[in-house]
Amino acid sequence: MYRDNSNTNLDSKIQSPQALYRGLYVRIARKLNVDPSYVSRVARGDRRSSEIESALRQAQEEINQQLERGSSAAENRFTRSAGGAKRLKFLLKDNRNRVRKRWLTHSQADPNLKRVKLAAGKRTAPILPVIDETMKVMNLGLKEMATASMKAAERHGRLRQAQGFTAMGLVEEYNLVRRCVFALALEHLEHMDPHALLEDLTQFGEALDLQTQRALRDYLAAN
């Protein structure tokens, strides 16, 4: 009677169909102490052997299970990617600190921005809330965007006025956000759906433009 052992069991690691079938007849032949060509003939229907047929059925079931697991894993990866790295909002969610650090580097190198002496934490404090708000607002239609609450942007404008930033400096901070987000998307372009990315970046840019206007309005109102 055919039983599982280390020679006939399939590797638990997900493999391609070709890898799973490769050497199947040899594995069964070794287990049953017959010639691989005999196993092949039984598989083709040229010979009959209940023992070999049972072994082939069990091996086929194991291969099917492996392929199903592989398919599920691939689907999960695709779903996670399609719902995550393939869409801008999930890409940003996974790279928030990276964007913040890159934004800080640009800010500290900008002549107009670096003249305001701030600790790194205070300089970057309003940026991630602004990005989070952008990602939330960008899913709205244009009319809804125009009337949406943008408290993070408004706080950003008032804060920068109090800290001594110029109005142009405030606007430049939003330009740096755009630069960092677009750079991140380009770095992951090969893993993203280009049509979805174009749509996301367009909506992101529209939301960011409105945030810039809100921040600037509150900056000027605080004068």
Image (cartoon, rainbow, N blue to C red):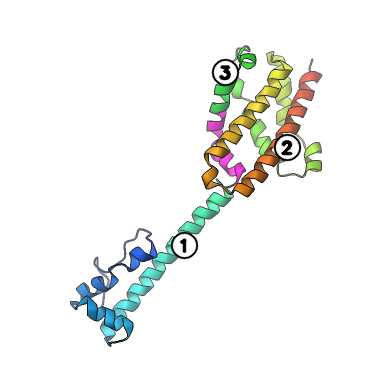
Q: Nearer the viewer, residue 174 or 186?
A: 186
Residue segment shown in magenta: 87-101
Front tag of 2 and 1: 2
* Residue at mark 2 to residue at mark 1: CA–CA distance: 38 Å
Circle 3 sits in a helix, a strand or a loop, which is it? helix
Answer with mark 2 or mark 1, whichever residue precedes in sequence: 1
Residue corresponding to mark 3: 108
Residue 155 quadrant: top right
Q: Is residue 117 above or below residue 29?
A: above
Q: Position of residue 38 (x, y in %)?
A: 23, 81
Answer with mark 3 or mark 1, whichever residue precedes in sequence: 1
Q: Is residue 117 above or below residue 84?
A: above
Q: Residue at x 68, y 15 (%)?
A: 163
Q: Residues within 10 Å of mark 2 (few under 14, many from 20)?
A: some
Find out whether residue 95 is within the magenta segment.
yes
Residue corresponding to mark 2: 206
Q: Is residue 165 above or below residue 89?
A: above
Q: Residue at x 36, y 65 (%)?
A: 18
Residue corresponding to mark 1: 71
Residue 99 quadrant: top right
